[in-house]
Amino acid sequence: MDLVEIVPTADPPVCRVVDYQKFLYEKKKKEKETKAKTAKSVMKEIRFGPNTDEHDFNFKVKHAIKFLEEGAKVKAYVHFKGRTIAYKEKGEIILLKFAQELADHGKVEQLPKLEGNRMFLHLVPLPAKKAKK
C-alpha cells in the first residue's frame, strides 16, 4: 500500500492509501474510455470536373446531403486536367453553386481556393437542432 496524492491543487492536498499499481491501471483505463467516447470527424470527398453536367451535379448534391446529415464534413473539389485549368471561373461557379444548394444542410468552412490543379471547398454540417419537450 502506498500514500497517493489524489488532488494536489486542493487546500489541503487530498491523499489516499491505495495500491499504486492498481491506481495507475485504473487511471489509464479511464483515460482510454474518455478517448474512445470522443467524436471522430469524417471527411468525405466529392469530385467535379470543370464541365460537370446538371444531372451529375444534382446526383453529387444528393450524396453530399446524405453525408452532411450523417455528420461528416464534405470536401468538394474541381479537378482540372491539362488545359482545362484555363476554365478556373467555371470551377469556382460550380463550387459556389454546390455550396448554395447545400446551404440548408451545411455551412461553408472554406471558400473555393485553388491549389495546384484542384479547387477546393470545405463544408461542415449544421449543428443538430434539439427537440423541445
Image (cartoon, rainbow, N blue to C red):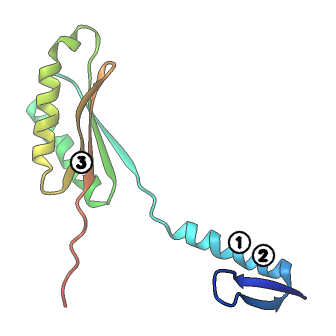
Which amino acid type is shown beneath numbered disc 1?
Answer: Lys
In the rendered image, which residue does mark 1 sit on?
A: 28
Q: Is residue 82 left or right of residue 102?
A: right
Q: Residues within 10 Å of mark 1 (few under 14, many from 20)?
A: few
Indicate whether 108 appears above or below 24.
above
Indicate whether 86 appears above or below 93.
above
* Mark with earlier residue (1, 3): 1
x, y percent for residue 107? 20, 52
Contact, CB < 8 Å: mark 1 with mark 3? Answer: no
Contact, CB < 8 Å: mark 1 with mark 2? Answer: yes
Which amino acid type is shown beneath numbered disc 3?
Answer: Ala
| Disc number lying in front (1 or 3) | 1
* Disc 2 to disc 3, C-alpha distance: 45 Å
In the rendered image, which residue does mark 2 sit on?
A: 24
What is the secondary structure assignment of the residue under circle 3? helix
Q: Residue at x 78, y 75 (%)?
A: 24
* Disc 1 to disc 2, C-alpha distance: 6 Å
Task: Judge by depth and name the residue closer to the eye, 56 or 34.
Answer: 34
Indicate whether 73 appears above or below 129.
above
Q: Residue furthest front?
A: 11
x, y percent for residue 73? 32, 50
Which amino acid type is shown beneath numbered disc 2?
Answer: Leu
Q: Residue furthest top?
A: 83
Q: Quadrant of the C terminus?
A: bottom left
x, y percent for residue 30? 64, 76
In the rendered image, which residue does mark 3 sit on?
A: 64
